[in-house]
């Protein structure tokens, strides 16, 4: 098996914690060309996601247990008062909902997919190119592209990516640029083109960039109004235990 430089392994931890520094960028770009490094990145990312899920589940179990202990220790009188208050509260809530629906008859209508998209869309973070913050320093073409990406100037980004030369393209994994292009197309309201880019990347099965592409593909379907494909893509994500956007997919599915 191909060995990985220990210093490069430290970069993975810094990347996952969002602590990559400008001085790390060149080494990071070189490391991302190494298959073993990409596999290690996926392994550690999945391990972190699994650890978070286990801690979250354990916390929920402890909260349920504490809640159970608390209620079993209450007297019958307190329990009756609580039940009466709950009944009053739910009655008031139901009345509010009825009044709202009478006042706004469209409130119970079809899901507003554009509003849902706006609520859940957030550009994929730029972990690929370290952008120089000092405007007095010369920037590479890639820095210009990702500076604009961070500013959410998506139309400019889409155009600029198409003008990158082979020197720039050789510096980064092709799948990574495809992801950022797909997200930019989506942000630029070019949903159909975004779907083409993102679906191709998902089908590629690339370990690092295909999973986030699947999440943005579901959002692209949502923005285009294809709710069935959006829902099926979200369901696919929720079935993958270590998918980085599993929680987001479950949250969005809940309002479909």
Image (cartoon, rainbow, N blue to C red):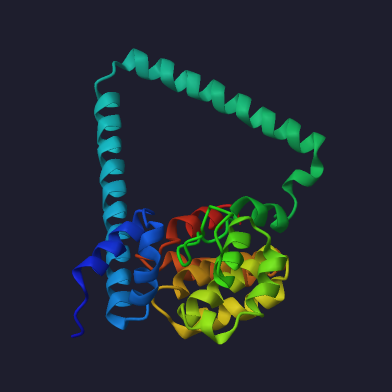
Q: Position of residue 97 (x, y in %)?
A: 68, 34
Compared across the picture, whether 240 is left or right of 165 comes to: left
Residue drawn at (44%, 64%) of the image: 238
Residue located farthest toward the top when viewing the structure as drawn: 77
| Front in this rendered view, residue 235 or 5 | 5
Compared across the picture, whether 103 is left or right of 227 comes to: right
Compared across the picture, whether 20 is left or right of 47 comes to: right
Which quarter of the picture shows residue 165? bottom right
Can you see residue 218? no
Q: Is residue 205 above or below residue 43?
A: below
Q: Position of residue 23 (x, y in %)?
A: 37, 60
Total numbered labels = 0
Which quarter of the picture shows residue 253? bottom right
On the rendered image, what quadrant is the N terminus found in? bottom left
Residue drawn at (59%, 72%) of the image: 141
Can you see residue 179? yes
| Front in this rendered view, residue 76 or 47 | 47
Residue drawn at (28%, 59%) of the image: 13
On the rendered image, what quadrant is the C terminus found in? bottom right
Q: Position of residue 76 (x, y in %)?
A: 32, 17
Q: Position of residue 236 (x, y in %)?
A: 47, 71
Which quarter of the picture shows residue 179? bottom right
């Amino acid at each position: 098996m191909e060995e990985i430089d220990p210093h490069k392994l430290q970069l993975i931890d810094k990347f996952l914690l969002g602590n990559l520094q400008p001085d790390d960028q060149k080494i990071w770009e070189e490391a991302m060309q190494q298959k073993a490094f990409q596999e290690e990145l996926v392994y550690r990312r999945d391990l972190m996601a699994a650890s978070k899920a286990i801690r979250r589940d354990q916390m929920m179990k402890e909260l349920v247990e504490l809640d159970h202990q608390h209620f079993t220790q209450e007297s019958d009188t307190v329990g009756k008062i609580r039940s009466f208050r709950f009944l009053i509260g739910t009655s008031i809530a139901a009345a509010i909902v009825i009044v709202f629906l009478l006042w706004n008859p469209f409130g119970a209508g079809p899901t507003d997919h554009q509003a849902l998209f706006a609520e859940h869309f957030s550009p994929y973070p730029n972990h690929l190119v370290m952008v120089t913050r000092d405007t007095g320093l010369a920037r590479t073409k890639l820095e210009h592209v990702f500076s604009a990406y961070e500013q959410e100037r998506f139309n400019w980004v889409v155009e600029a990516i198409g003008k990158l030369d082979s020197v720039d393209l050789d510096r980064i994994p092709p799948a990574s640029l495809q992801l950022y292009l797909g997200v930019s197309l989506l942000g630029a309201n070019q949903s159909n083109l975004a779907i083409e880019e993102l679906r191709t990347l998902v089908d590629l099965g690339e370990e690092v960039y295909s999973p986030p592409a699947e999440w943005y593909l579901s959002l692209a379907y949502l923005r285009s109004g294809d709710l069935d494909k959006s829902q099926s893509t979200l369901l696919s994500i929720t079935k993958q235990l270590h998918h980085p956007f599993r929680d987001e997919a479950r949250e969005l599915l809940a309002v479909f």
